Amino acid sequence: MDTVKNKIIIWGIDDVNTLGLVREVGEAGLDFLFLLKGKKAAAARSKYIKKIHQINSNEEALRYLISTFKNASKKPIIITSGDGTTVFIDQNKGLLEQYFIIPGTGVKGDAEFYTDKNNMINLASEIGILCPESKYVKWDSSIDNIAYPCFIKPSHQNAGHFNEFKFKICNTRNELQETLTKVRHDSEFIVQDYIKSEYEIVVFGARMMDGKTEIAGAIVRDRLAVGISGHGLVTDKIPACVDVAKISEFLDRIDYKGLFGFEYGVMNDKAYFYEVNLRNDGTAHCFYNAGSRLTLAYIYSCAGIDYSTLPIKVTQEGWFIDELYDFGNVLEGKISKKQWKKDMKQATIMRYYDKSDKAPYQYLKKRKWLNITKYIILGRYRQTVVSILDKVGMKK
């Protein structure tokens, strides 16, 4: 089998998303650099980290990348895990693709455009993907003709700022109006009909350099933990309510190449499109731990190597749980302790623990209760906290 001679560059902050990438690429024995934006945390403690370079901004990262790799014999392959980096790569597409193999859309500007939730919803609707009724709003927008309860979330990340909230459910017009009076005047949002989902689906895949869309499988999740997937079934079987052909059509329309995650909420046997992450998805490591080697296959495609012999689909269906932070659902009264213990016992796929790479888990375990408490408090008071940070000039 051919080996990848290109250096791999994992570019992002130190979070569970990058931890998954570090382990996947490290276990495959590939030569990689962790280009870390910000502080070291769990991923930086992985045994697979051999080369790490810290930067404080994407602009600093760009200067470092060009000066270090502009004469590389083979173009390094960049993989990213965050929307901010995805947008920055898109903004500098012409320069970066001279020296690197990068993820993104065929036309500069489209990756940034379709990272905005209003724009991705519009394209999905045009293609025929079922979406909740949606409306673009700012602080002073009309909120006539909105059904309640409704769901409001930022349409994109504002560079240098913390978003006022991840999402909020507003049960009345007054609640929505009050929410909008407290946001920045330059912040943009999407308001949608509230889908009271029975469960949610994340479809993880990649559109390869040859233009083919490959799907690893889906997580059918029944709850979140600290804002990310907390528990669910990892399977190669995509629920029938999701039209995989339309996922391919969406990606073909924007000529996107790279890893992705499509998210849906299911109500009355209908899958409503929530959003697509045009980057490595935070659930990717779950599919890897269930036997999929999709990320490696994508790297092979970037390197011009035949990836057809790799197992792309999930080979070992199993239950996933966030073994540290899902317990927050017990503290918030969303599930019983008895149910949580049962789910822990049943789960075969963990988020952080790896018996051959224990340091990241041990680092996070020490911070478990602090992080759970912080998340619960932020969930209730985030908009107030962000407003205070804005006033004191603290940037993301």
Image: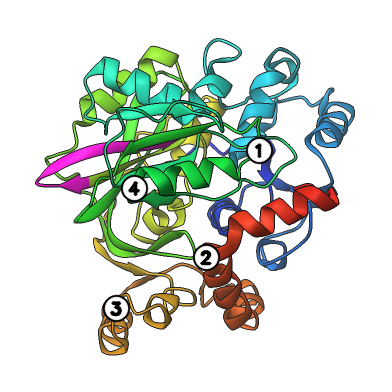
Q: Is 361 colored magenta in this rendering?
A: no
Which span of residues is magenta-colored?
266-277
Mark 2 residue crowding within 10 angstroms, few (<14) / some (14–19) / many (20+): few
Residue type at mark 3: give it. Ile
Residue picked out by circle 2: 380
Residue picked out by circle 3: 335
Give the residue drawn at x 71%, y 68%: 45
Residue picked out by circle 4: 172
Q: Nearer the viewer, mark 2 or mark 3?
A: 2
User: From the viewer's perspective, is 186 left or right of 68?
Assistant: left
Marks 3 and 4, Cα distance to the nearest angstrom? 27 Å
Answer yes or no: do the residues labelled 2 and 4 have beta carbons within 8 Å? no
Q: Position of residue 116 (x, y in %)?
A: 51, 28
Q: Position of residue 220 (x, y in %)?
A: 25, 55
Residue picked out by circle 1: 184
Q: Secondary structure at mark 4?
A: loop
User: From the viewer's perspective, is 88 left or right of 331?
Assistant: right
In the figure, residue 83 lies in which quadrant?
A: top right
